[in-house]
Amino acid sequence: MRIEAIGCEPNLIKRFALENSTRLDVVRKHGAYDMARKAVTTMSPAAVIDEVKKSALRGRGGAGFPTGMKWGFVPKDSPKEKYLVINGDESEPGTFKDRYIYERDPHLLLEGCLISCYAIGARTCYIYSRGEYKYLIDILDRAIEEARAAGFIGEKLFGTDFSCEMHTTTGAGAYICGEETALLNSLEGLRGHPRMKPPFPAVSGLYGCPTVVNNVETIAAVPWIIEHGGDAYRALGTEKSGGTKMWSVSGHVKYPGVYELPMGYDNLEKFIMEDCGGIPNGRKLKAVIPGGSSVYIMPASDIIGKKVLMDYEGLVVAGSMVGSGGMIVMDDTVDIFESTKNLTEFYKHESCGWCTPCREGTDWLVKVFKRIANGDGRIEDAQLLLDICDNIEGKSFCPLGDAAAWPIQSAIKKFPEDFKKHLVPMLQQDAIAAD
Amino acid sequence: MNSEQPLHSTQFTPNNPLPQEGLMPDSIATFEPEIIREMDMHIAKFPVKRSALIPLMFIVQRERGGYLDPPGVAFLADKLGIRITDVWEVATFYSMINTEPVGKYHIQVCRTLSCKILGAGAITEHCTKRLGIKPGGTTEDGRFSLSEVECLGSCGTAPMLQIGFDYHENLTIEKLDGILDSLP
Ligand SMILES: Cc1cc2nc3c(=O)[nH]c(=O)nc-3n(C[C@H](O)[C@H](O)[C@H](O)COP(=O)(O)O)c2cc1C
Ligand code: FES
């Protein structure tokens, strides 16, 4: 598996290749915590938020919400505690980038947390990771201990009045806990059901206090912004999508891995066919899910020769989304009916049960998929699947329902042949074959 | 911060114990002082004790042979000042919390798309053949349980499986045999 930067200097991943890069003494030699010192001792919280606003940094967890704007929503005059919560749930199929930030440079994340806490006026930061990432939580715990011993975490940091505590905590196997309000419930020791929005977490989040929830990669980008300035970060990418982003690439490519690319990288075809080594075994590209399982599937014909720019706007124009940047590449051996069935089973398993459209809808979808897979597909089943999707999309309590519907809707639209061949009753198929 | 802090969240019903005697399992689990210290370290992270419930469930599960049994649940309710049903409610939501016994080695094969198209099916099949159990099953000697699980964040090194908390990636059948052979 490769980890490299393409089309830009390694920014987020610059310390990944160092020997013992999880150790404080090693990364200190490469500037770790210097930017936290700079922010806390020379900048006001408002100035930090301004730089992040200027940087056009957008949330890397999937929704792409402008980070500086989110921080600006935290009420400054609230007497309540404020919290920073790091979303390390990373359960979107195809996504495995946060994992390598934990594994290779935990102090980068911790430094980002310090700066972000300072900016929003939080004294406590919780880093919530999916339960399966136990070995990574252990790495992070050790890093927190080291940073605390060295005086980077704790009371009165850098000779100022700024104090900041950090704690790791864990989920226990539930995709829905990546949704920020479900995560907060989980962090309060409850079932991971999403909460009603508004109020948004920035106003009423953890324990009813103002809370910023950000993805691991989002926060890991903050030290660079403080070092080089918001304008410089924005200039790495495009006007509306600043900076660089880590893409997780898996499936049928020669070199799967985690790639740091500038936002607006030109273009998706070059990235898959050249940078990732193309499709192995002499096969042809069939389809790409560019941003984690929840986004629209793209057929090769929407990519090859189309110069798709890799940023929030470019992928929307091309018919999909950046999402979490978890790119799944499929060659021409894959049956898109099967791949869609696989993902639908994922959503059925992960639907939290809170709202009816998503709980019952995903269950029905899987029932229909299974019946078709058993050879009992009827020609009207494509429409039946779309009707069920229509009863989920936009009608579920949280976006998990939409995420279950979109892959099916786009797959049926873009790969009708793959569905049709399952939908003709067996007898009829035999007749066609005999013709 | 301390545990006296008022609660703001409306979704949180704090220490409002039902008469626990009625629901009390016939015994309550006990733990070595060192384990209690480990638990207290998690509780100390939060202004509200209940927030430590998931980390503590993992500890109880680890210490009580791999699953959360009724005495373990009673212990957690007592320790965190919540109802026994509160613990069950949470325990049954999360797939990593076992409420039934599992084998000493819990083999969890990822079945989601990236792993699937790179041969997860063959990995599960091989486990089934070698161990004589289907996904969801446990061997009679209690050594192995087999499950199919959803994406574990190792899609770039697919196919993969987790045994307990250990990741095994870039699997081939030979590599899988090597891993299974090397388990003590
Ligand atoms: C079903 C669902 C799952 C999600 N999973 C994750 C996740 O695993 N990691 C993550 O950072 N954000 C996830 N999100 C997005 C979060 O709700 C939230 O937008 C994000 O953590 C905000 O941080 P950001 O602005 O830095 O991206 C998920 C959202 C939904 C609806
Ligand atoms: S699909 Fe198997 S680890 Fe992600």
Image: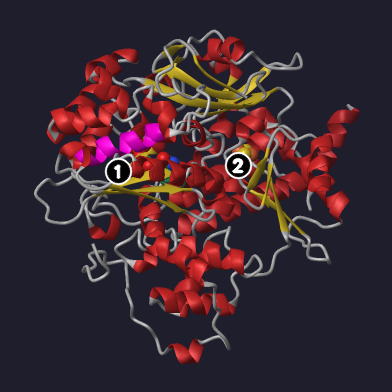
What number is the disc on residue A36?
Answer: none
Q: Is residue A222 left or right of residue A138?
A: left
Q: Which residues are magenta?
A: A107-118
Residue denoted by label 1: A153
Give the amino acid at mark 2.
Answer: Leu
Within the magenta stretch, is there residue A131? Answer: no
Amino acid at the residue labelled 1: Ile
- Residue nearer the viewer, B58 or A353: B58
Report the image quarter containing ligand 1: top left
- Picture coordinates of residue A300, whole percent (x, y): 60, 18
Dot 1 falls on a residue whose secondary structure is loop
From the viewer's perspective, is residue A361 above or below residue A21?
below
Residue A402 seen: no
Q: Which residue occupies the extreme top position in the image?
A: A305
Which image quarter is the N terminus of chain B in? Answer: bottom left
Dot 2, how many residues are within 10 Å of its Cα: few (below 14), some (14-19), or many (20+)? Answer: many
| Residue at image mark 2 | A343
Q: Nearer the viewer, residue A308 or B179?
A: B179
Q: Which secondary structure, mark 2?
A: helix
B170 w.r.t. B177: above or below: above
Q: Label 2 lies in what chain? A: A
The chain carrying label 1 is A
Vertical relation: B35 (above or below) A105: below
Corner quadrant of residue A316: top left
